Image (tube, rainbow, N blue to C red):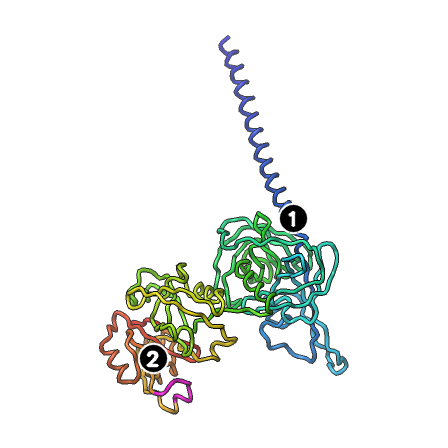
Amino acid sequence: MLNRKWVVVFCILFFWFTGNVAFGEDTAFDNLIKASKARAAIVKKVQDAVVHIRVEKVIHGQGTLNNPYDLFNDEFFERFFPGVPRPRAPENPHQDNKGFKQEGMGSGTIIDKNGHILTNHHVVGEADKVLAKLNDGRELEARLIGTDPQSDIAVVKIDATNLPVIPMGDSDDMEVGESVVAIGNPFGLTQTVTFGIISATGRSNIGITDYENFIQTDAAINPGNSGGPLINLRGEIIGVNTAIFTRSGGYQGIGFSVPINMARRIMEDLIEKGSVSRGWLGVSIQDIDSRLAKAFGLESTNGSLITGIMSNTPAEAAGFQKGDVVVRLNGNPIRSSNQFRNEIAAARANTTVDIELIRKGKIKKIKVLLGERPKDPMMAQKLPEAETYFGITVENVTAETSEKYGYEKGAGALITRIDPDSPAADAGLRSGVLITEVDRKIINSVDDFEAAMKAANVAGGVLFLIQTKQGSRYIIVSE
């Protein structure tokens, strides 16, 4: 009797347990299906606003083009169309006076109902003809509204109205780990959708553009995706897919998108006036490492170190000095030189900004009216850049060496020889570099240099500011 009761209890518990497991599995599957359907709904909502861009360019003569941003040169194909055969010039160019046609492809996003399309400079910037194929099958010729090689952003326009649009999100609000969707036309496969996460934000020093603040994603991006949108789960564009990191020529889990907050400002300038207005301070800057932080008495490595100041610039007018460390811009903390540079540019010309800096251990606040960034700041004026040396021989800057190197006569101590076994040689320094400061002391001559070195703590490391034709920066060298 007792055994029968236990059998009944066991059966009840068994069916109760297995029933709950099955119910739990059904619920889990239902949730997965709902999430999958939600992603599909997002794609359906936005895909009509994603276009396939086809471009054409007529090349006359033979040889490769010299412009590094040229749509059809070797560098372009290496970066964005690896493995795709490159069109070649006719063997006898005189037989074809019209030249030969090269084609490329990319993607774009319709950003307003009147036909403006946001894409990449490297997709359309050098093209003779741009065609945009809409998701409804129409293929319309587009005209270039404006392009910005420094950010790789461009805007084209088609003659159409009442077009579907992808709303713009806030890329600053996106966090690492959030889900994103990439839509584009990789290898000409139109309306390809990939799904992933944001792997990192604020990526810079990649070497793709002058102004870099990329969103990194593992959503698959391949050649032909360039210019297409990166979408959040609200169905908003939060990035413009621009490039991939690859050793094989294909997707390897690392893609880069221009944040929409950066692209939006550039896009607005391009639509309104066909060019981009960027703020300009007129300084050279560098990041701060732990040794520089110690040398300048800083509590952290955050900030941007001023290493040179151009004459007749907003920075000179505002009283900036070499060795200043910028820690805030308009109340926002500055973490790196790249961030500082991007935010100054984004502030636009003829805008007054509030800058907080550290000068010789003390906080100082400066208001600066920004100028318009020259097309080539280095041509506007040569900036110093720097390194440090032990085991070197120096001489004063003479009229002859001033003409040879472009340095001002009577300023600094010029390196003429380096001991190959010295710390200077190990650091990769060379003759022809001008030393302008030693441990924050101004150097105008060989005598100044020798006096400063005698007073320096060589064993503990010496802080140099040096100048080359490329610019200036601080460096510490020790024995």
Q: Residue furthest right?
A: 95
Q: Residue furthest left?
A: 455
User: At numbered mark 1, what does the secondary structure look like: helix, strand or loop?
Assistant: helix
Query: Residue at 24% of width from left, 72% of height from top?
Result: 457
Residue 1: percent from left, percent from top: 51, 8
Disc on the earlier residue, 1 or 2: 1
**Nearer to me, 88 or 127:** 127
What residue would you read off at disc 2? 435
Side of 31 relative to 378 (left or right): right
Q: Is residue 245 above or below residue 321?
A: above
Residue 310: percent from left, percent from top: 41, 77
Classify mark 1: residues with Cα within 10 Å, few (<14), some (14-19) or many (20+). Answer: some
Query: Residue at 40% of width from left, 64% of height from top?
Result: 354
How far is the residue under mark 1 from the one under mark 2? 60 Å
Residue 170: percent from left, percent from top: 53, 53
Side of 316 relative to 463 (left or right): right
Amino acid at circle 2 = Ile
Amino acid at circle 1 = Lys
Image quadrant containing the C terminus: bottom left
The answer to which quarter of the image holds residue 111 is bottom right
Which span of residues is magenta-colored? Answer: 401-409
The answer to which quarter of the image holds residue 411 is bottom left
Q: Is residue 95 magenta?
A: no
Classify mark 2: residues with Cα within 10 Å, few (<14), some (14-19) or many (20+). Answer: many
What residue would you read off at disc 1? 45
